[in-house]
Image: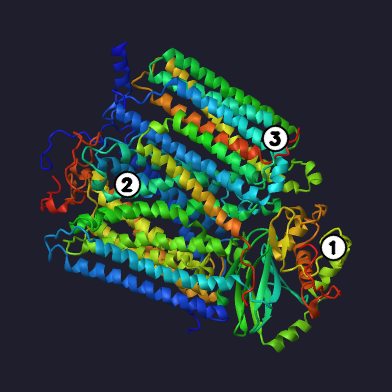
């Protein structure tokens, strides 16, 4: 590859090779059809030019030909569809056990927070060969998290979480772009993703100056904001017990069932009346405007930690064997 | 009839009145077409000027020529002037307005006063947009995405939005007029299967104008209300959903791509048949493909939103449907190619542009398939790949078709021939310049260069320089025709009624046509593109 | 009488049509196509309504409690009556009963104005209760009902947008009918030439039709109607 | 139909009055049923009644019943595309969050 004129992006994630595979297939098929048309047009234009072929022959059309060039392209595009959909499904489903990073986009910077509490701006350090899940939201307009070397992109929306994930396969420093136009310094909303050897990553973490893990910070907030008065870790709270909640389905008062994911927890904090758990009253006040995106991330992280067995659970309570009360 | 030497000056639509009033109050579709031609040519050069500044800025990686805010306004105003004020009205409002009544054998469009009104509406819309630009511009991107446009932008969003809103009604009423005309105003014997494909494709585009444009009108209106009154419909801070804006926006704006390309396809069908001296291959398939594109075009909009946070299942549905709309476009390409087979081909300028169209639209269409493919779209959406793709469709496709049609019908519109040599040269400039400008952008896009970037990492510079170089060649290719068309008005040879020896009804009346188009209402007894029975002679050109 | 009819008809035939029939069919088809664009125009708002009603159902219920269902129902009835007089008016044009046509169209206009009057009363009520979206929006009932007032605001945004757009169409409709009444009084229409009457009629019925959907969607969301 | 083919069909005034009475009846009905708790069926019923009313208006007041095939197709097309706008938008809103389970 030429140093000054690279023509192809680096492949630095597990998905990159797959996306490139489909891309090359598309390029090959497109090149074939483009050449076919170019050659046919050129040959016909020369062979049947007026001076060589003064009288046009009358040809009406041909149903078999029409069917051929309707059905063959249709068949080929269905291959594109299936292949593309398979890759998209992988992109849409972060693997279990992925390391999580919370990202907040704002005009015009990226803020990241690791589960272990390290914060960074416009740079994201991650270990190589781990699944990394990004949980992202925006403080203002729509942004888009785009790392070309990983072939991933996901819009970062105000008011809700979106997520994407990647599995870096090569150490190095890669471009991070905001891909959704977001105002004056849109092209300055760039950064880098630094993929490190695990040991180097651990060393970086150690120097990160974290003030407690996100879940621990979340737990503190949980107490400070008074959440713990109602959301008690026994059965008698006025609000649902949050132990083991994350990832479960929740029966709502109006009969619907929702899955307790990041967006559900987020919504329950900011717009508690939207989904009332069966058997509870709509008494929780909204925390909109009282918690920043970062605090929200910490709270979500804490609630999630309540569903994780052993090490990460910061609640201190033994993990409940039974399903939670709100079910 | 054609060879008759006229001693007294024949009355034409051009010489039946000379005052400003005879133009500004005209109800003649042919004069209105010329009024539109003047308006959209103005908007084209406004948009082109912004494009040149954009390309100059991108010569270097640093954002050094203009400030970030200026750059953002440049690409926004480039998009708005080109899409809403040039591409959408280009072929329909100029060539369609001029040709459709002639082609179907009518004296005028169904609603001549409405037709004139659309021109005024269009100009009022354009005035709103231009005044907003002069007062400081707008920086939301032509897509007006919320909540940036409703809450965060400090520029003239409302003025521009109103401009787009108003111009939308010009488009709606033009489409309505075409549909009614094609249904109700056809000459005796002009059955649907004898209708020129240019009418079919404009009919299809009109369906989209009528069904789609009102949705963007109300959406843009909601954006303006949101901005002025903070009603919260699209603002997530007030409980609104910004994706709803994107759904409503693309419900129109994706089919709008077909408003832009379908009439161009119609032009190509006319030209390929005329210069190959053949009936189009598979007439019914080409005609129905236009309708299929118009209908299927409404089912695919969310492929612009695959990374925007829509549901995975919705993405699957829209991806699948997006492939379906590719098929009728492919059918057209194959049919035009097959039309060339065993033809008797002349290389006049319109045909050169048509060749260019077939090639570039093939590339534009096929790269669209990349974007319908979910896995690849995630990587290339919002990058220069998309920019390259839609310029291949809209410039490589539509603008080339528009140029082709303008050269093809120029003798009919003005009665004068353009200078063939210069025209061929400019066609070459356009083709080479275009490819040099936009092909590198495909590579840039896959490399990951995001669109709407004022400054970019240095490794992208070489390709950007190539692109800018191409843009300057392209600019020459656009300025040249402007000059020689004007020149031909005075010095061009007289064209005669049918310089191309073509068979459409519009060629059976003198050039320029008389005020009422036909001295007698024509009765059609032959199929479309009946070149088999057209006497093979050179119509004497000139005096 | 007969000759004047023909004169009127010939006068009314525009140069680019072959016959009055072609002209009338063309005008009517054009009007229907225009109504198609109107359907899509309102369609964008209906789409927004559908999305937010699905998302914020409870808030929509609360918002709809402030609607005066009786005024809404009365207005529906007023519009239906106006549609009847309009339809009969067009019928009079078809059958050449010019005086009757003018009388019926004036009644239609009065119904239209009555609708706007009742709507204005409702608007005034909402306005004084701060139920207009924007910085002055207030919805104290939200707390007790346990809904987010912001989401009720979206209900009101759509309420004002949809009924406001509809009211604007009513104003235009009344103006159009007035135009037809004046032209009719000058004897422009006859059984041979009444396309403008018919088209204004189509427009009027369309505006009625939109209200037929707006009423249940905005007023009758849930049974717990307030006082 | 009639001997004067160039004239449009003139509908008897009694039909108009009949339609009007039906519309008034349905207006009363829709208000009446809105006071009965039918859960999700309230909205369904309200929309069914509204659609019946709209259909009557279109068919008779607007003469669609007596109009050309072209006009009928036009109206059906409008309803169809409105349906597409609503239905395809809802494919997104109704299926968000369906796919949240991890891959492995």
Residue C134: x and y in percent read 71, 42
Q: Name the residue under label 3.
A: C67
- Residue B184's image quarter? top left
Q: Name the residue under label 2.
A: B95
- Residue D3's image quarter? top left
The correct choice, above or below, for C132 with respect to A163 in the image is: above
Q: Residue at x 33, y 35 (%)?
A: B110
The correct choice, above or below, for B303 with respect to A204 in the image is: above
Q: In which quarter of the image is the C terminus of chain B?
A: top left
Residue B435: x and y in percent read 37, 67
Q: Callout 2: 10 Å neighbours few (<14), some, many (20+)?
A: many
Q: Which of marks 1 and 2 is in front?
A: 1
Q: Residue at x 63, y 84 (%)?
A: A129
The correct choice, above or below, for A309 with respect to A278 in the image is: below
Q: Mark 1 points at which residue?
A: A231
Distance between the alpha carbons at the discs numbered 3 and 2: 52 Å
The residue closer to the viewer here, D13 or B175, is D13
């Amino acid at each position: 590859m030429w140093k000054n004129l690279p023509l192809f992006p680096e492949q630095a994630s597990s998905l990159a090779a797959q996306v490139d595979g489909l891309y090359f297939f598309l390029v090959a098929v497109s090149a074939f059809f483009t050449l076919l048309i170019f050659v046919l047009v050129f040959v016909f234009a020369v062979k049947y030019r007026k001076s060589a072929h003064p009288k046009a022959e009358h040809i009406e059309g041909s149903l078999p030909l029409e069917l051929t060039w309707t059905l063959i392209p249709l068949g080929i595009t269905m291959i594109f569809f299936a292949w593309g959909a398979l890759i998209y499904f992988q992109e849409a489903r972060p693997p279990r056990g992925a390391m999580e990073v919370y990202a907040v986009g704002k005009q015009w910077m990226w803020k990241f927070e690791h589960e272990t509490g390290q914060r960074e701006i416009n740079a994201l350090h991650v270990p190589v060969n781990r699944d990394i899940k990004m949980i992202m939201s925006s403080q203002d307009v729509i942004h888009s998290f785009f790392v070309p070397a990983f072939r991933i992109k996901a819009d970062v929306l105000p008011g809700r979480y979106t997520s994407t994930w990647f599995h870096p396969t090569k150490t190095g420093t890669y471009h991070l772009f905001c891909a959704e136009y977001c105002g004056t310094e849109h092209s300055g909303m760039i950064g880098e993703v630094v993929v490190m050897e695990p040991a180097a990553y651990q060393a970086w973490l150690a120097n990160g100056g974290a003030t407690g893990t996100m879940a621990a910070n979340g737990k503190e907030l949980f107490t400070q904001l008074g959440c713990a008065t109602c959301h008690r870790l026994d059965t008698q709270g006025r609000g649902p017990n949050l132990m083991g909640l994350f990832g479960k389905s929740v029966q709502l008062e109006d009969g619907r069932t929702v899955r307790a994911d990041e967006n559900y927890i987020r919504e329950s904090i900011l717009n508690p009346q939207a989904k009332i758990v069966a058997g509870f009253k709509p008494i929780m006040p909204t925390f909109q405007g009282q918690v920043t995106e970062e605090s929200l991330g910490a709270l979500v992280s804490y609630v999630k930690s309540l569903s994780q067995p052993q090490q990460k659970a910061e609640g201190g309570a033994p993990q409940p064997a039974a399903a939670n009360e709100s079910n | 009839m054609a060879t008759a030497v006229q001693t007294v000056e024949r009355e034409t639509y051009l010489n039946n009145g000379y005052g400003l009033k005879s133009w500004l109050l005209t109800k003649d579709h042919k004069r209105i077409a010329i009024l539109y031609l003047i308006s959209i040519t103005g908007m084209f050069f406004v948009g082109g000027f912004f494009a040149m500044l954009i390309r100059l800025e991108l010569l270097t990686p640093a954002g050094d020529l203009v400030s970030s805010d200026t750059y953002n306004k440049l690409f926004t105003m480039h998009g708005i002037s080109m899409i809403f004020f040039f591409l959408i009205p280009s072929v329909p409002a100029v060539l369609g307005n001029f040709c459709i009544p002639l082609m179907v054998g009518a004296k005028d469009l169904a609603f001549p006063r409405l037709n004139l009104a659309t021109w005024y509406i269009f100009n009022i819309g354009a005035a709103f947009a231009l005044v907003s630009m002069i007062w400081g511009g707008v920086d939301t991107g032509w897509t007006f995405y919320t909540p940036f446009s409703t809450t965060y932008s400090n520029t003239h969003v409302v003025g521009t939005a109103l401009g787009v809103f108003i111009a939308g009604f010009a488009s709606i009423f033009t489409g309505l007029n075409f549909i009614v005309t094609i249904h109700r105003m056809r000459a005796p014997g002009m059955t649907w299967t004898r209708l020129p494909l240019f009418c079919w494709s404009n009919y299809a585009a009109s369906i989209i104008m009528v069904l789609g444009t009102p949705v963007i009108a109300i959406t843009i209106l909601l954006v303006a209300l949101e901005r002025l009154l903070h009603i919260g419909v699209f603002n997530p801070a007030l409980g609104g959903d910004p994706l709803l804006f994107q759904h409503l926006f693309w419900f129109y704006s994706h089919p709008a791509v077909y408003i832009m390309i379908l009439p161009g396809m119609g032009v190509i069908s006319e030209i390929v048949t005329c210069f190959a001296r053949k009936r189009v291959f598979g007439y019914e398939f080409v005609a129905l493909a236009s309708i299929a594109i118009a209908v299927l075009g409404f089912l695919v909009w969310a492929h612009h939103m695959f990374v925007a946070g829509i549901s995975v299942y919705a993405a699957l549905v829209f991806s699948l449907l997006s492939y379906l709309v590719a098929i009728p476009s492919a059918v057209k390409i194959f049919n035009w190619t097959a039309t060339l087979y065993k033809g008797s081909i002349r290389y006049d300028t319109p045909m050169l542009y048509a060749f260019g169209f077939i090639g570039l639209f093939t590339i534009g269409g096929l790269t669209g398939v990349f974007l319908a493919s979910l896995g690849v779209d995630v990587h290339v959406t919002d990058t220069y790949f998309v920019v390259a793709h839609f310029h291949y469709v809209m410039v490589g496709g539509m603008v080339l078709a528009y140029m082709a049609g303008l050269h093809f019908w120029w003798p009919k519109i003005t009665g004068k021939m353009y200078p063939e040599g210069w025209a061929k040269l400019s066609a070459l400039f356009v083709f080479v310049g275009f490819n040099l400008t936009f092909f590198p952008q495909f590579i840039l896009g896959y490399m990951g260069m995001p669109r709407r970037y004022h400054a970019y990492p240095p490794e992208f510079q070489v390709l950007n320089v190539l692109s800018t170089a191409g843009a300057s060649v392209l600019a020459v290719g656009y300025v040249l025709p402007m000059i020689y068309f004007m020149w031909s008005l005075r010095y061009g040879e007289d064209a005669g009624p049918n310089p191309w020896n073509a068979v459409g009804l519009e060629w059976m009346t003198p050039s320029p046509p008389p005020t009422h188009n036909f001295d007698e209402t024509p009765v059609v007894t032959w199929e479309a593109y009946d070149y088999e029975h057209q006497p093979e002679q050179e119509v004497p050109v000139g005096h | 009488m007969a000759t004047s009819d023909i004169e009127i008809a010939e006068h009314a035939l525009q140069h680019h049509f072959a016959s009055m029939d072609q002209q009338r069919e063309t005008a009517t088809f054009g009007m229907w196509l225009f109504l198609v664009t109107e359907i899509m125009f309102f369609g964008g708002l209906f789409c927004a309504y559908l999305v937010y009603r699905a998302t914020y159902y409870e808030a929509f219920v609360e918002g709809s409690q402030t609607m005066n269902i009786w005024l809404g129902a009365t207005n529906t009835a007023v519009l239906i009556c106006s549609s009847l007089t309009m339809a009969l008016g067009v019928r009079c044009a078809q059958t050449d009963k010019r005086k009757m046509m003018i009388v019926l169209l004036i009644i239609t206009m009065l119904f239209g104005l009555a609708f706007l009057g009742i709507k204005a009363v409702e608007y005034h009520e909402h306005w004084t209760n701060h139920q207009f979206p924007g910085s002055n929006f207030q919805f104290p009932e939200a707390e007790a009902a346990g809904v987010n007032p912001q989401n009720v605001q979206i209900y009101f945004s759509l309420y004002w947008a949809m009924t406001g757009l509809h009211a604007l169409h009513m104003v235009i409709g009344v103006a159009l009918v007035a135009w037809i009444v004046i032209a009719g009084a000058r004897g422009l229409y006859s059984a041979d030439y009444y396309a403008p009457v018919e088209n204004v009629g189509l427009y009027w019925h369309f505006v009625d039709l939109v209200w037929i959907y707006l009423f249940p969607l905005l007023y009758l969301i849930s049974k717990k109607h307030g006082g | 139909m009639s001997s004067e083919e160039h004239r449009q069909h003139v509908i008897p005034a009694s039909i108009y009055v009949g339609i009007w009475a039906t519309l008034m009846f349905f207006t009363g009905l829709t208000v009446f049923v809105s006071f009965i708790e039918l859960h999700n069926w309230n909205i369904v019923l309200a929309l069914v009644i509204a659609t019946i009313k709209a259909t009557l208006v279109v068919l008779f007041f607007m003469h669609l019943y007596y109009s050309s095939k072209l006009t009928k197709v036009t109206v059906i097309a409008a309803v169809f595309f409105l349906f597409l706008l609503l239905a395809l938008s809802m494919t997104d809103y109704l299926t968000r969050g369906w796919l949240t389970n991890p891959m492995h």
